[in-house]
Image (cartoon, rainbow, N blue to C red):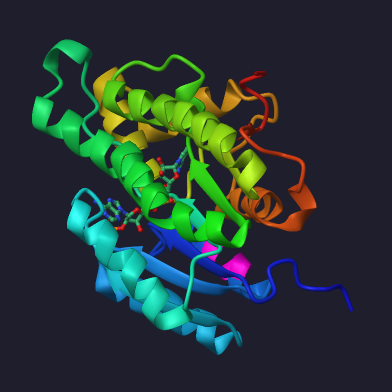
Amino acid sequence: MVPMLLKNQVALITGSGRGIGRAIAHLFAKEGASAFLTARTEKELGAVAKEIAENGGRAEYAMADLTQEAACTRVVAAVREKFGRVDILVNNAGHYGPVVPVEEYPLAEFDKVIAVHLRAAFLLSQLVLPEMYARSSGVILNISSLSAKAAYAWGSAYAAAKAGLLGLTRVTAAEGARKGVRVNAICPGPVTETYMSKELAADLAKRVGVSEQEQLAAFLNSLLQGRAQTAEEIARAALFLCSGQSSAITGQSINVDGGVAFY
Ligand SMILES: NC(=O)c1ccc[n+]([C@@H]2O[C@H](COP(=O)([O-])OP(=O)(O)OC[C@H]3O[C@@H](n4cnc5c(N)ncnc54)[C@H](OP(=O)(O)O)[C@@H]3O)[C@@H](O)[C@H]2O)c1
């Protein structure tokens, strides 16, 4: 039998009620981790926790709006209460925000996008690093985006937050490297099955004045593989980066984009 890659690990996965976070939670639980789920929608969190339990895994959840500092603190306390510690933090929660040019972007929306992707990742990292350092062991994975590396119009806050996450990844990796903590990022391309991606595709099609099918086909055609990535494919990269299989990898961003960005 192949040994489980995350046996006895405790993983806090944000934005795990659906989409990529849900796929990561499922795969991590299958590989032996206790998965702690969080997002704002209780119904989705409850459903994922139930599915994991039905598959023989361990999962707990807490609702939280991670744009709020107090909610980040509460979530980490809840993981410790349920599972005793945090070995793995996956910063995945987020939304795209308005699809508008820079000069029309509402400041309040800009702040919200930065808060959920970048500020929450920073706050949650602050909260878990001391215990990881104390054990000389831990992994943080930040879910960034192809948008951090390529230029797409009408998503300034999103691109800035995702590029900021790569900076945060490298600095945290530099600080944690001799203390047993690895920090990496994944830059997914279009994972078209998710709520965020569908909503974005609809907004973009409207703005460009083409059908959603045309918009999507043109975008996918710009990837070497010419197809979307799946949440499962992102989860497999996440598993690699959060397991001992990637023990010498830190401060990196791995593109899971079907061949678009080459740095
Ligand atoms: N899909 C893509 O093409 C793609 C490509 C590159 C990167 N990504 C990144 O992958 C991550 C997951 O996206 P996805 O495509 O899986 O989208 P999704 O299906 O919409 O999932 C987003 C998750 O984040 C949670 N969330 C959003 N705002 C939150 C907040 N303020 N506080 C707490 N949780 C919040 C959502 O739950 P609630 O709404 O219930 O809070 C949901 O569970 C995001 O960081 C996204 O930027 C996605």
Q: Give residue 83's position: percent from left, percent from top.
A: 47, 79
At x 66% / y 38%, what residue is drawn? 250
Q: Nearer the viewer, residue 191 or 56?
A: 56
Residue at 75% of width from left, 56% of height from top? 244
| Residue depicted at x 62% and y 66% | 27
In the visual, does 53 lie left or right of 92?
Answer: right
Q: Determine which quarter of the picture holds residue 185.
A: top right
Residue at image coords 51%, 23%: 218
Is the stretch drawn in magenta largely helix, strand or loop?
Answer: helix
Q: Quadrant of the N terminus?
A: bottom right
Q: Give the answer, above or below, for where 168 lies relative to 121.
A: above
Asked if 247 appears above or below 252 in the picture, the reply is: below
Residue nearest the viewer, comparing 125 with 43: 125
Give how far across and how far down residue 222 sits, in percent: 58, 20
Is the C terminus in the top left, top right, bottom left or bottom right quadrant?
top right
- Please check the rendered image and state whether residue 203 is part of the magenta-colored stretch, yes or no: no
Start-end of magenta stretch: 24-28
Q: Is residue 135 above or below residue 3?
A: above
- View extreme (right): residue: 1
Q: Is residue 34 left or right of residue 8?
A: left
